[in-house]
Each structure stands twice: as structure tokens, then as C-alpha cells.
């Protein structure tokens, strides 16, 4: 299911697979307890928030964007040798740019389940619309 930020809030969703959640030590009244929760596939709830997380831009990607902008803005004014060297630099960084563009945009959701549980920061791929 594709969820877009700001859209699809309030829609009904269903957990597509069994989900196991565990926590570190929790200390109610001085006792140390490990927490564990399992939610079964098919558990339904309502989307309260959808967050899109930006792709990670490495140094090569930032440099590619900078050099491409420079080439587009001032390439026609540059001496031939400088323009050619700049084009070669852009070409050498192009694989990093292509890999960056191919990265999937991570979308997380906040879902309030019908049983009262609230799950925040879960991958949107864990849910299907009902």
C-alpha cells in the first residue's frame, strides 16, 4: 500500500503480517521486567499520521547536484577545456546519483489499533488498506 504524507490519515488499515515488539528493561516499582508484545496479522486500526523520510544524500550525490547546477548555469560561458573537465566530473559521479534516485522513499505510519494499542514509526509496508 502506498501512503503519502498528509494524505490517507484516518483510513482503516490491517496488519499484513504477525508483528513482534520487544523492549529493553522496564522498571515498574523497582522490578526489572522485559516487555514483549505480539500483534497478529489482520489486526485493524486507523492511520493517525504518515511520515515520509528523506533519502540519505552522500557526498557524491551532493557534489553531483552542485556540479550539475554549475554546468547548467555557467557551462555555456566556460572555456572549452574547463567545461569538458566539468562534464567528465559529472559523468564520474553519475552512478552515485542514479543509485540515490533508485533508493526507495521510506514511509512510516502511526496507527491506533482497535484494541487500543498505538504503534508509531512502523513501516507502511506492514499494512494493507481495509
Image (cartoon, grey):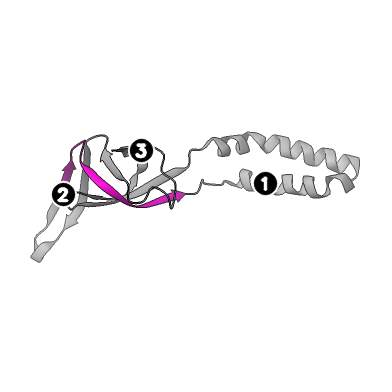
* Quadrant of the frame with the C terminus: top left
Q: Residues within 10 Å of mark 1 (few under 14, many from 20)?
A: some
Location of mark 1 (residue): 65
Which residues, given as a range, are shown in magenta? Answer: 35-53
Image quarter for residue 30?
bottom left
> Residue, x 18% and y 38% (percent of image)?
40
Q: Would you say residue 7 sits in the magenta stretch? A: no
* Residue 58, horizontal then vertical, whole percent: 57, 46
Location of mark 2 (residue): 115
Q: Are marks 1 and 3 in contact (CB under 8 Å)?
A: no
> Residue, x 83% and y 45% (percent of image)?
75
**Which element is circle 3 on?**
helix
Q: Residues within 10 Å of mark 3 (few under 14, many from 20)?
A: some
Q: Of label 3 and label 2, which has the lower sequence position?
A: 2
Q: Residues within 10 Å of mark 2 (few under 14, many from 20)?
A: few
Location of mark 3 (residue): 125
Which numbered dot is residue 97?
Answer: none
Label 3 vs label 2, nearer the camera: 2
Q: CA distance from mark 2 to mark 1?
A: 47 Å
Amino acid at each position: 500500500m502506498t501512503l503519502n504524507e498528509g494524505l490517507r490519515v484516518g483510513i482503516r488499515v490491517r496488519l499484513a503480517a504477525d508483528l513482534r515488539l520487544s523492549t529493553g528493561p522496564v522498571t515498574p516499582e523497582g522490578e526489572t521486567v522485559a516487555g514483549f508484545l505480539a500483534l497478529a496479522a489482520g489486526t485493524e486500526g486507523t492511520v493517525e499520521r504518515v511520515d515520509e523520510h528523506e533519502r540519505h544524500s552522500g557526498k557524491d550525490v551532493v557534489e553531483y547536484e552542485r556540479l550539475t547546477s554549475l554546468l547548467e548555469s555557467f557551462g555555456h560561458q566556460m572555456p572549452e577545456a574547463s567545461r569538458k573537465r566539468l562534464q567528465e566530473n559529472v559523468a564520474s559521479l553519475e552512478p552515485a546519483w542514479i543509485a540515490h534516485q533508485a533508493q526507495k522513499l521510506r514511509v512510516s505510519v502511526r496507527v491506533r489499533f482497535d484494541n487500543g494499542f498505538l504503534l508509531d514509526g512502523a513501516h507502511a509496508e506492514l499494512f494493507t488498506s481495509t
